[in-house]
Image (tube, rainbow, N blue to C red):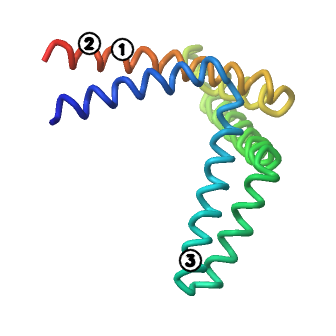
């Protein structure tokens, strides 16, 4: 039973990785649609159970997610990018004020600042790159898990 569960998890991880690489940012659109439809179905079930307030809230949320999904995702990405940039600048400031001489310590906040700037000014390209890298990691992780299952 445990091996079957691990095998299914490994295969699903590989499939999700392939989808990330192939569809890139399109995965967000699919996820938003699935989330919106799920909320609408949940709303209908709530309304059937006479939970009208909860059902209406979920129905409106589901419609908003489906109609404005990319806009919401884009807003969230801008906010995250701004917060990431502020945090990276803060870390760089701390390193400079503490007179850290080790250049390696500057790499992490430097990379964070670069990612934040890319997200602020080139969301489409950055999202595609992030999904490709994440997809490759998922494929490798799934392949390693699959090899592990086969060995057992």
Q: Name the disc covering residue 147, or none.
A: 2
Farthest-out residue, front:
48
**Horizontal relation, residue 51 to residue 140: left or right:** right
Q: Please tell me which residue lies in front, 80 or 53.
A: 53
The answer to whether the residue labelled 2 contacts the one labelled 3, judged by CB atoms less than 8 Å apart, is no
Count residues near mark 1 (Cα–Cα under 10 Å), then give few for <14, some for 14-19, many for 20+: some
- Calculate the distance from the C-alpha at mark 3 to the C-alpha at mark 1: 41 Å
Of label 3 and label 1, which has the lower sequence position? 3
Position in image of residue 82 (x %, y %): 77, 42
Quadrant of the image containing the C terminus: top left
Q: Nearer the viewer, residue 121 or 51?
A: 51
Locate residue 3: give its quadrant: top left
Where residue 38 appears, as percent x and y from the top left, is 59, 57
Depth check, front residue: 18 or 134? 18
Please determine whether, in this image, residue 90 is positioned above or below residue 54.
above
Q: Are marks 1 and 2 in contact (CB under 8 Å)?
A: yes
Q: Gap between marks 1 and 2, in whole Å?
A: 6 Å
Badge 2 density bin: few <14, some 14–19, many ≥20, Cα 10 Å? few
Q: Residue furthest right?
A: 121
User: Which residue does the numbered mark 3 point to in the structure image?
Assistant: 46
Q: Is residue 119 above or below residue 72?
A: above
Residue at figure coordinates x 65%, y 70% from the top left? 58
Find disc 1 in the rendering and name its residue.
143
Image label count: 3
Left or right position of 146 against 93: left
Label 3 vs label 1, nearer the camera: 3
Name the residue: 61% across, 71% down: 44
Residue occupying the point 59% across, 14% down: 103
Callout 1: helix, strand or loop? helix
């Amino acid at each position: 039973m445990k091996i079957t569960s691990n095998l299914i998890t490994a295969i699903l991880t590989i499939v999700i990785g392939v989808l990330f690489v192939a569809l890139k940012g399109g995965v967000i659109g699919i996820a938003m649609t699935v989330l919106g439809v799920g909320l609408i179905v949940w709303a209908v079930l709530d309304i059937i159970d006479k939970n009208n307030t909860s059902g209406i809230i979920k129905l409106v949320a589901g419609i908003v997610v489906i109609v404005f999904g990319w806009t919401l995702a884009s807003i969230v990405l801008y906010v995250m990018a701004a917060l990431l940039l502020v945090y990276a600048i803060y870390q760089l400031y701390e390193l400079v004020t503490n007179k850290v001489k080790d250049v390696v310590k500057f790499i992490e906040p430097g990379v964070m600042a670069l990612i934040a700037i890319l997200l602020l000014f080139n969301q489409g390209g950055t999202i595609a790159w992030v999904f490709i890298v994440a997809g490759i990691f998922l494929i490798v992780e799934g392949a390693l898990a699959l090899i592990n299952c086969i060995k057992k």
